[in-house]
Image: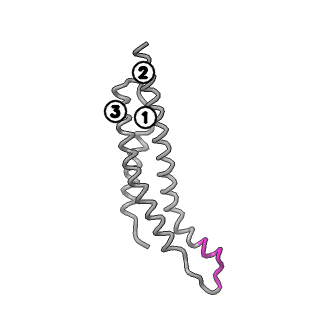
Amino acid sequence: MKDYKILFETINKWLEKVMKDMEMPLSGEPETLIRQMTTIEAYSATLTYYLEEVNQVVAEARDETYPAKEPGVTSRQRELKAGAVMAPLEKVQGLLEGLKNDLKQKLIVAEAILGYRKVERKG
């Protein structure tokens, strides 16, 4: 199986920054909120790229790691062996999927706040 260490190290460094930024509450000030929304959208675009890369890695790893039939080795033992290799890859994949949903939700909330502020200013 190929070594995906560099990709995962890059993703990990990026995730640390994103997670730190995601902890900051959304602003009630429209100008600041728009900047936050732009940042969230940029993170989302980067995340889409990383998720595509990880999905490809997982698919390739799945093909490469599933052991061939061997005498005396049960199907369950083969699945466990493949699962041990796949678990860390699938964990990263799941983490990115979860972050994708979190970014989407934060953007929806930001849009709602911005919409409320526009109505508030008109009223």
Nearer mark to the viewer, of 1 and 2: 2
Q: Residue 30 location in percent, x, y?
A: 37, 25
Q: How far is mark 2 from mark 3, CA to CA?
A: 15 Å
Crowd band around label 2 with a 10 angstrom C-alpha radius: few (<14), some (14–19), many (20+): some
6 shown above or below 73: above
Which numbered disc flags the more N-terminal residue, 1 or 3?
1
Nearer mark to the viewer, of 2 and 3: 2
54 shown above or below 69: above
Which numbered disc flags the more N-terminal residue, 2 or 3?
3
- Magenta-span inclusion, residue 82: no
- Under circle 2, the secondary element is helix
In the image, which residues are magenta? 72-80
Q: Residue 92 location in percent, x, y?
A: 48, 57
What's the amino acid at mark 2? Arg
Q: Which residue is mark 2?
A: 117
Which numbered disc flags the more N-terminal residue, 1 or 2?
1
Numbered circle sitting on residue 2:
none
Q: Residue 27 location in percent, x, y?
A: 41, 27
